[in-house]
Structures are given as structure tokens and as C-alpha cells.
Image (tube, rainbow, N blue to C red):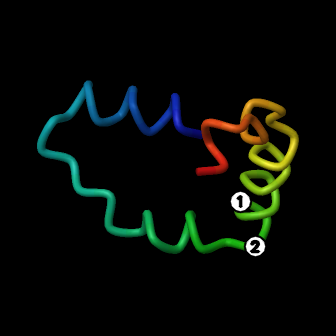
Amino acid sequence: MQAKLHRWAVADPGRRFDDLFNFVHDPATLLVAFDRVAGNQGARTPASMA
């Protein structure tokens, strides 16, 4: 979805994404985002724990 939004924004710089909050706030989107972050082993390195 991020790539699609980027393509739309590049193709039409004046485009407004009025419904973006609803997409981001959607439970399915949040679950996918959480799974990606939780699965990122780099997030558990000592430098990021500070």
C-alpha cells in the first residue's frame, strides 16, 4: 500500500489523501504493521533499547 500511495503522490503532486487516517487506523493495517515491527530482530539490539 505504501508503494501505491507513493506512486499516486508522485503522479499527482496536488492530490489530497483525505481518507488516509481511516486507512492507517484500520485494524487490519495496524495488525500487519505490528507483525512487521515485532518480527524485526534489529529492533531488539542494545543501541535501540536506550
Instruction: Depth check: give the residue in front, 48 or 11.
Output: 48
**Corner quadrant of residue 25:** bottom right
Q: Identify the residue at the far left of this view.
A: 14
- From what the image shows, is residue 36 above or below residue 8? below
**Corner quadrant of residue 16:** bottom left
Q: Indicate the amino acid at tag 1.
A: Thr
What residue appears at the point 80 percent right and 36 percent down from the top-left corner?
40
Mark carried by residue 10: none
Query: Which quarter shows the N terminus?
Result: top right
Q: Residues within 10 Å of mark 1 (few under 14, many from 20)?
A: few
Q: Position of residue 34 (x, y in %)?
A: 78, 57
Residue 6 is left or right of residue 45, and the answer is: left
Mark 2 and mark 1 residues within 8 Å of each other at the beta carbon? yes
Instruction: Depth check: give the residue in front, 17 or 43.
Output: 43
The residue that disc 2 covers is: 27
**Corner quadrant of residue 45:** top right
Q: Indicate the amino acid at tag 2.
A: Pro
